[in-house]
Amino acid sequence: MNRFYDLFDSYRLLLEELDAWFNGCVERCGDDIACCRGCSACCRGLFDISLLDAGLLQAGFLRLDPAIREQVLVKARRRVGELQAQWPEFQPPYILNRLPHEEWQVMPEDDQTPCPLLDEEGQCLVYAYRPMICRLHGLPNIDSSGESFSDAFCSLNFTQRDPLPLKELRYPFRATFEREFTLLEQFAERLLGERRCAFDTFIPSALLIDFLDTRWSA
């Protein structure tokens, strides 16, 4: 994974800036925001993450105790096996965008399967390495200009007022996402020889990707 560490460092800096924004929103809005470290109410079901997120996630995963890693892998392999029963084409390197259909883009909303990276207390085992979507989920993503990238927010937040007009929640999301896309393209180019940002997978399959095998992109 050494050949990606410079990209991981740049990406972690971007993600830490998002964390600072989120923490600032919590400080400014107080009891309106229930989201906090240790809440795993949204860490259920399947959602797609980028291959860069997957690589960073693995970097954090490999820092865990070997016994804990094996426990997580048992759950991840079981989950991927269930997916392969539904989509036989979902094989290594587990890139969703290369499936012959796009059913994966509509995940069941009633899927309550916990993320394999949650411990018995519901704590994220790789919190500092978690994907971007895990950091953005919970609050609306409204750009400083007023452009909306997502009006969605956790139902536990802002139960007494509408957060969408609140300027204290806004952030330069467009510039942030442009930085993200550049890093995604650079990562894909090194890994696959294709300068594209649309390469995605799931968290369980992300843990099984062999980023060290130079043959898997063929």
Image (tube, rainbow, N blue to C red):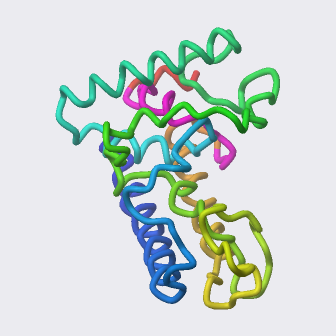
Tell me which secondary structure the magenta stretch mostly adopts: loop
* Residue nearest the viewer, comparing 136 with 209: 136
How far from the left and from the top, in percent, is residue 119?
Answer: 32, 39
Q: Which residues are magenta?
A: 195-212
How far from the left and from the top, in percent, is residue 71?
Answer: 29, 24
Query: Which residue is most to the front?
Result: 160
Residue at the location (50% across, 72% down)? Answer: 18
Residue at the location (37% across, 44% down)? Answer: 122
User: For residue 175, which quarter of the picture?
Assistant: bottom right
> Is residue 207 one of those drawn in magenta?
yes
Which corner quadrant holds the N terminus?
Answer: top left
How far from the left and from the top, in percent, is residue 26?
Answer: 48, 79
Residue at the location (49% across, 65% down)? Answer: 35
Q: Is residue 7 left or right of residue 102?
A: left
Which corner quadrant holds the C terminus?
Answer: top right
User: For residue 193, which quarter of the picture?
Assistant: top right
User: For residue 213, which quarter of the picture?
Assistant: top left
* Residue nearest the viewer, comparing 87 with 43: 43
